[in-house]
DNA sequence: TTTACTATCTTGTATATACAAGTTATAATA
DNA sequence: TATTATAACTTGTATATACAAGATAGTAAA
């Protein structure tokens, strides 16, 4: 048995996704949910606040919790999900080609970004994501070897995040992302199908564990016509 | 006097931005903050959770709250801020050209996106954002007249959000965003400086009030070389 | 009919308590 | 010395209470 409030969050989130609570309708009141789940109001409120943060509902004082349109969930790359999780969601035919995999002594740039000390090593892997026969995304990943000791081609073909979380037992927690548009390099042109494209979308990812240690830097290089980023943002007042 | 927890949040956030709590250091424990702010632990925890959500700190059970690198705050367009707020932050010389402003009967597409009923009207405005003498962004805004009755050139040149929040007294609450890359239209080429660019970054914004009513649809069209989007994402487990 | 009030329902804020669980430093033990 | 156990300190979860504040429906008064 786990967290009560997380369980309630997931149950209500599923209900919203499945249309049990349709968009524009209202959730039961906190008082009613208390009785439904046999718990305290604060626990219900924790679950509702999670739903609000993640764009499922909008709480209005005095009225209730309004269900928002959950189209949010054909999200391509917002949030922090692995390509495998993503591909599973969109349900397309996809393949991953591991183009490079080696343990390197990092150059100045990578050393600084990942905070590698003298003599420290880094796992580097280039992976091309193919969807419906087209090579669309080039993922350039760098892992601090202090945290990820060994990588294999099999792990890279499946899911590195799955390996890290399930095998190594680490908890991936948060990331800072940066999206820019640049001209493709020779490398991009060699590895991706870029005929006729003069720009490429670069998503830089700095990924951290639970304890705020930075373990991964990734550059995800997308063909512009297949790129889409969806986000949910709340306005902070003051 | 306002919210205690919001005040505490802002005070600690400012302290982090100003380096009073440097990156990688730890905040005082919840117990100590309780005493500092003469409040209860739950109130402190509300403030800390806000800081965590917004990428200021990482909480680690048993250890404390680790301060993260607050570079987050040279953000160009993540979150939900107006161009005026943004430009104020980056402190560059900017100008806004109001290219179009009229009350229209919306076409099918706009009607459907904004949920306009028969006979309903929409304020449409095109604004070009000039930074350091270059016309870089084209903002195409559509406002449901039900919520925004009247717009003037002066309001559009200053800040529509400021007008809505301060004059109309409405609370802008959240938005769904979508980022894609497309080929520029003739209109883009006419209004922006696009010599040599074959792509344009389109940020679609669906903006909602407090009570979950959709009042604005915006297409922000950016010259790709000047575009940058920064985001902070937490991984949701399960 | 219209207006104003009131009771009631909703969510928001602040506080207090209890215990669970993870971390760390210290002291006791082998 | 090295290991183990303990105590103290940290954050996490769950509960209960009280009151504030916004929304709504019904009632009473003008």
Image: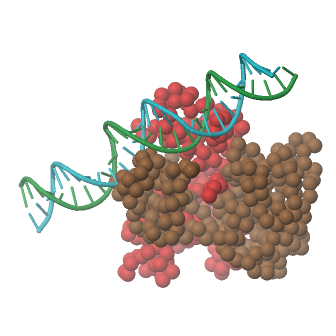
Chain colours: A red, B brown, C green, D cyan
Position of residue B170 measured from the top left corner of the image (x, y, whole percent): 73, 49
Q: Would you say residue A180 is visible in this rendering?
A: no
Q: Position of residue A234 (x, y in %)?
A: 64, 53
- Return the x and y of residue A83 as percentages of the image width and height: 58, 58
Residue shown at the point (43%, 54%) measured from the top left: B37
**Placement of A50 over or under C25, stated as above or below:** above
Q: Percent from the top left, x then y, of residue C16?
A: 37, 39
Q: In this rendering, would B170 be left or right of D16? A: right
Q: Quadrant of residue A103?
A: bottom left
The relative height of residue A145 versus residue B140 in the rendered view (above or below) is below
* Figure quadrant of residue A27: top right
Instruction: Answer left or right for A211 relative to A130.
Output: left
Q: What residue do we see at 52% from left, 65% from top?
A: B14
The mark total stands at 0
B170, A218: nearer the viewer: B170
Can you tell which quarter of the image residue A52 is in?
top right
**Residue at 63 percent of width and 55 percent of height:** A237
Side of A2 where A69 appears, left or right: right
- Tell me the residue at 58%/56% (across/down): A79
- Asked if residue B120 shows in the view, the reply is yes
Q: Residue furthest bottom?
A: A108
């Amino acid at each position: 048995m786990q967290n009560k409030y997380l369980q309630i969050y997931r149950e209500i989130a599923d209900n919203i996704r499945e249309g049990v609570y349709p968009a524009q309708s209202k959730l039961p009141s906190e008082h009613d949910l208390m009785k439904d789940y046999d718990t305290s109001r604060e626990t219900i409120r924790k679950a509702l606040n999670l739903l609000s943060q993640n764009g499922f509902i909008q709480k209005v004082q005095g009225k209730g919790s309004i269900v928002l349109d959950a189209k949010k969930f054909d999200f391509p790359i917002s949030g922090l999900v692995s390509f495998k999780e993503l591909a599973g969601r969109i349900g397309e035919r996809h393949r991953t080609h591991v183009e490079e995999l080696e343990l390197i002594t990092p150059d100045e740039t990578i050393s600084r970004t990942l905070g590698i000390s003298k003599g420290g090593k880094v796992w580097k892997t280039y992976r091309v994501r193919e969807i419906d026969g087209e090579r669309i995304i080039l993922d350039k990943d760098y892992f601090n070897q202090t945290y990820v000791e060994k990588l294999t081609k099999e792990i890279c073909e499946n899911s590195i995040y799955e390996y890290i979380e399930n095998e190594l037992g680490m908890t991936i927690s948060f990331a800072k992302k940066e999206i820019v548009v640049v001209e493709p390099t020779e490398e991009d042109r060699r590895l991706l199908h870029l005929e006729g494209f003069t720009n490429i979308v670069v998503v830089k990812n700095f990924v951290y564990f639970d304890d705020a240690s930075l373990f991964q830097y990734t550059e995800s290089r997308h063909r512009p016509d297949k790129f889409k980023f969806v986000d949910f943002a709340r306005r902070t007042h003051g």
